[in-house]
Image (spheres, grey):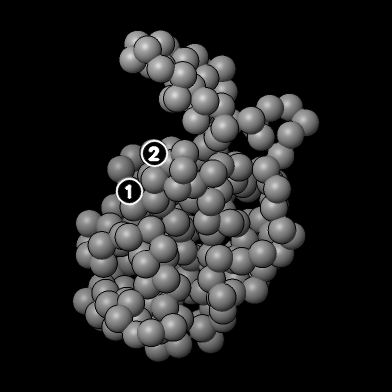
Amino acid sequence: MGGRRASRDGDRHIGRRALLAGGAAAAVGSAVLARDELARLWWRAPGVEKPRKEGEVDHRAARWVAASDANWRRADRPDDYGIDMVVVHVTQGSYASAVQAFRDPGHRAATHYIVRQDGRVTQMIRELDVAYHAGNRAYNERSIGIEHEGFVDRPQDLTDAMYEASARLTAGICARYDIPVDREHIIGHVEVPGTDHTDPGPHWDWDRYLRLVREARSTPA
């Protein structure tokens, strides 16, 4: 979180997207684009939801604790929004306080994952959905957000177990969506345009983290 909580990411209007898709299809004289767009959008109609499995996680080592529905929105990533970025956060508080905040509908923000200081990983939002974590709508739509338990001014909070568990998590994300392991695609919350957050802070060791991510990426599961 690392500062003021992120602003709410509003939803897109289905009618506009369908209209644009229909117009494009007409322009090329084909119904294929419109059909594909409708296939992605049918479950967003009132009373229709895309099938989900309760408690399902994307990272094998994660435990599931659901964030409030007010802190994310349903999507069908990467089909509707491509995923090409991981955003690193620090909670500025305890693991328990972060979970409590993300389960609070009034908080209006949450990340996909939280990594504790002991290396335990909790997933609160599915990767296919858009989490309100970056304070920037475009970045929310294209990224996965990972919180790390601790404070930005306490280097002792950034434990070996946390770095290693987070690196394995990020390596899996990068493998799933073919994201390059570099500082253009794995960034800190402080680097998101239009935000005033400072996390992960000056003590986050980027060289070490990227090395661990690369090592985990090259190690067979």
> Which residue lies at the image location 44% right of the left edge and 56% below the top edge?
144
Using the image as rendered, state which of residue 190 and residue 25 is in the foreground.
25
Q: Secondary structure at mark 2?
A: helix
Residue 64 quadrant = bottom right
Q: Is residue 26 left or right of residue 125?
A: left
> Which residue lies at the image location 66% right of the left edge and 56% below the top edge?
67
The residue indicated by pointer 1 is 192
Residue 8 in the image: state x and y as whole percent.
Answer: 54, 38
Quarter of the figure with the C terminus: bottom left
Assess whether mark 1 and mark 2 are in contact (beta carbons under 8 angstroms).
Answer: no
The residue indicated by pointer 2 is 138
Can the viewer see residue 198 in this picture? no
Residue 117 in the image: state x and y as whole percent.
Answer: 51, 82
Using the image as rendered, state which of residue 21 and residue 54 is in the foreground.
21
- Mark 1 residue type: Val
Above or below: residue 78 compared with residue 181: above
